Image: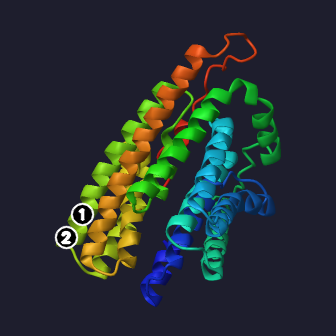
């Protein structure tokens, strides 16, 4: 809530989006460890966001942009189901890429806001351990070791990686064609709900859709019948406080909280009530588009598996699940 509090006092600016994302992604990368080691791991997600947005800002053509999103999907297909930090690179590097290409180029102020939010999240993490009088040990293996393992096993995951790459590329191509507003939400949705296991994917899609519908309904009611920055800020504080308990109760409720929070941040930046409603509509449409292309990816992979050679070297292993990170994405 610190970036939002600063924006509430100073006035909402475009950097608020990056500051909020920087704080959220930094906390997602918090896996304990010594202070500097923890800082390094918490830096990975925000750095991926900034680098992705910078790349999106320098990609010159739609063709090049779609090609990069295909490569992003190929990478995601290799690391899906693995440790959290390679997944953060895929998800928020992709988020930043689409944000930087379709909305606006990242500025030095945006990058500094991301870094400041990440540092504040790190200090909060250390303060929490100090309050508990116990420092959490590092709970993950080195990132480079995880990436090397993922790349080394490409032969067992190539069909899923290919399906993910083509799905994300096609989703962004369609987004450009129809003028989909906030298409980064569609890209992130695919990177969150698409799993190597069809049942895990179905669960993630169900939670993403139902949570989005609930969160959109709450925000639509707030901005329609509860206008006023003070009321919306109070709602953001309550929703932020409820997110973790809601997530523990049911993934759909946690998804609803993060959806409502993100949309309320967007409302602070909206120029008018009509613009705020339009953002809510865009969120709903982008999530549905992302889920549709995730389903298409599962179907395409199934067709690949029907016709590819069936020897032990090429057959995919039993897919692993990454459901624990399914609903915390903005």
Which residue is pictured at 66% across the width and 73% down the height?
A: 115
Name the foreground residue: 2 vs 190: 190
- Taking the view exactly as shown, the residue that stands out farthest to the top is 311
Which residue is pictured at 62% across the width and 34% down the height?
A: 162
Is 194 situated above or below 303?
Answer: below
Callout 1 crowding tier (Cα within 10 Å): few <14, some 14–19, many ≥20: some
Q: Give the residue at mark 2.
A: 224
Question: Residue 146: image x %, image y %?
Answer: 77, 40
Callout 2 crowding tier (Cα within 10 Å): few <14, some 14–19, many ≥20: few
- In which image quadrant can residue 216 be found? bottom left
Q: Are marks 2 and 1 in contact (CB under 8 Å)?
A: yes
Local secondary structure at mark 2: helix
- Taking the view exactly as shown, the residue that stands out farthest to the bottom is 10
Is 237 situated above or below 286?
Answer: below
Q: Give the residue at mark 1.
A: 220
Residue 314 seen: yes
Name the foreground residue: 18 vs 239: 18
Q: CA distance from mark 2 to mark 1?
A: 6 Å
Question: Residue 42: image x %, image y %?
Answer: 69, 60
Name the foreground residue: 219 vs 245: 219
Q: Is residue 221 left or right of residue 307?
A: left
Question: Residue 309: image x %, image y %?
Answer: 67, 13
- In which image quadrant can residue 208 be found? top left
């Amino acid at each position: 809530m610190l970036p939002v509090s600063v924006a509430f006092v100073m006035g909402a600016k475009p950097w608020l989006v990056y500051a909020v994302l920087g704080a959220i992604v930094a906390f997602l990368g918090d896996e304990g460890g010594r202070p500097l080691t923890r800082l390094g791991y918490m830096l990975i997600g925000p750095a991926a966001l900034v680098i992705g947005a910078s790349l999106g800002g320098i990609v010159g053509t739609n063709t090049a942009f779609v090609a990069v999103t295909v490569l992003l999907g190929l990478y995601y297909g290799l690391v899906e189901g693995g440790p959290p930090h390679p997944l953060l690179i895929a998800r928020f590097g992709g988020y930043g890429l689409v944000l930087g290409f379709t909305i606006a180029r990242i500025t030095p102020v945006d990058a500094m806001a991301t870094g400041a939010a990440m540092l504040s999240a790190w200090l909060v993490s250390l303060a929490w351990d100090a309050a508990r009088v116990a420092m959490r040990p590092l709970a993950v293996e080195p990132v480079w070791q995880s990436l090397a393992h993922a790349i080394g096993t490409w032969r067992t995951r190539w069909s899923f990686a290919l399906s993910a790459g083509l799905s994300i590329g096609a989703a962004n191509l369609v987004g450009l064609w129809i003028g989909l507003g906030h298409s980064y939400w569609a890209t992130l949705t695919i990177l969150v709900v698409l799993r190597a296991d069809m049942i895990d994917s179905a669960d993630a899609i169900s939670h993403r859709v139902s949570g989005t519908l609930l969160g959109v309904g709450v925000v639509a009611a707030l901005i329609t019948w509860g206008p006023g920055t003070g009321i919306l800020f109070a709602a953001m504080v309550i929703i932020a406080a409820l997110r973790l308990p809601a997530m523990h109760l049911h993934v759909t409720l946690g998804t609803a909280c993060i959806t409502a929070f993100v949309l309320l941040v967007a409302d602070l930046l909206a120029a008018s009530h009509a613009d705020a409603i339009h953002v809510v509509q865009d969120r709903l449409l982008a999530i549905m588009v992302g889920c549709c292309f995730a389903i298409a990816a599962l179907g395409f992979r199934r067709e690949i598996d029907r016709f590819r050679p069936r020897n032990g070297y090429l057959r995919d292993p039993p897919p692993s699940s990454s459901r624990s990170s399914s609903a915390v994405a903005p």
